[in-house]
Amino acid sequence: MKYRILFTFAVLLAFVAGAWALLAPPDLPDLGPSLRTAFPDVMPEKRANPAAAPKLAAASVLSIDPRANPLKSNAVVKATLQNEYIRSKSYKALYERLKSSAEGQTAEGQFVLYEILRKCATITDRDTRRPLVRTSDQKRDDFLAGLPQNDPNRDKRIAAFDDVTLNRCAGMENVTIAQADLNKMLANAAAMGDAKAQALALEQELWAERRASGPQGRWGRDSVTLTDPQVEQLHQLIASRDPEAMVIAGRVMAGNWHDYALRIGPDNQPVESRALTQAWQLLACDYGYPCGENNERVLSGCAYQGHCDANSLSDFLFYYGASPHDSQLTAQYREILRTAIESGNWSQLNVVRGLPSTTRPFVFGRGP
């Protein structure tokens, strides 16, 4: 009996010791002064007095260091008519200059006229109802009403909003054109060899085929594809090194077509569409597209999202528009595509047939 009591007491003592080992707080080693400074709010004394913990300003977390950006581009913006159009605050003066001049009869001149008239002119034989457009004053009032007075980027956001929503068609309210004449300008530019016009004409042809091939909502998803000859044509247009052609052709190649999927790199990995489209945008910057602080996407990000610290499209994409994973993929894709453009060897970007598409439609506006 005596041994039984001792045995029971020993078991109970072991149980209590085990419970204490499990429940007692760990004996943490001293982290040293450097780690105390770097992580003050994980130290016991700081936890005991939360008010003593220093507050970290948002700016110190969100500050942008361009030197750390692997997507950065140092390319110089090309002095082209297309870039002049993109950066223009008023299309009327450019339209008046081009409409009856030799410059307007060039391939690029016809394309720029097409772009201006597509945005600004009244199409006399348009067979669809034009959407209701609110006035600029209404849009601005709504924007200001939703912008907090204490927003630290308030002035920057207002300036960016005014730039993004500027009526660049002012003074062209009475300009009219028939759809056939507008189409002819694009066809003329393409026939004269303008790469961006040829890329846009191909894109429009594919979408027209989609609309005609099935009911709205399906629109050729089960039949219309990007054929191998069309893929080769896009390669040739990209090889022109025309930045706008790169953007349009890249948009087409990243599309979600029937019986069409892309594989990239030496391991033939499925393409991630978001990273691919961003790579095309940055390549356009590398080849002379306007991608500085006045780029439309940069301004829109500042105006509507308060992302106002980016001074270029590459900064905006890296710090605001992509996850670390997307940024790495974008950088890899960009180098693969650049090599293909410079060498003419497209073996690292392959079209695969007979598989479900792994790409998804990614729609973005004119240019990067």
Image: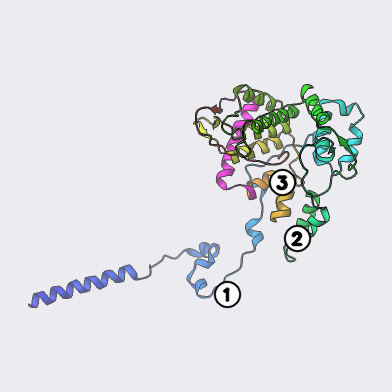
Q: Quadrant of the C terminus?
A: top right
Residue 328 sits in which quadrant? top right
Tell me, yes or no, if residue 79 can be seen here.
no
Question: Which label is found at residue 172?
Answer: none
Secondary structure of the residue carrying numbered label 2: helix
Name the residue nearer the viewer: 48 or 91: 91
> Which numbered mark, 2 or 1, is in the foreground of this view?
2
Q: Dot 2 surroundings within 10 Å: few (below 14), some, or many (20 or more)?
A: some
**Residue shown at the point (62%, 42%) measured from the top left:** 70
Sequence-earlier tag: 2 or 3? 2
Sequence-earlier tag: 2 or 1? 1
Q: Is 195 covered by the magenta stretch?
A: no
Residue 265 vertical placement versus 91 (above, below):
above
* CA distance separating discs 1 and 3: 41 Å
Q: Dot 3 surroundings within 10 Å: few (below 14), some, or many (20 or more)?
A: many
Scheme of image coloration: rainbow
From which residue to which does the magenta span run?
320-347
Question: Where is residue 343 drawn, in percent x and y?
Answer: 63, 24
Question: Which label is found at residue 154?
Answer: 2
Question: Which label is found at residue 297?
Answer: 3
At label 2, the amino acid type is: Arg
**Residue shown at the point (57%, 73%) measured from the top left:** 52
Question: Where is residue 294 drawn, in percent x and y?
Answer: 77, 46
Question: Which label is found at residue 51?
Answer: 1
Residue 165 is left or right of residue 12, and the answer is: right
At label 3, the amino acid type is: Arg
Residue 286 sits in which quadrant? top right
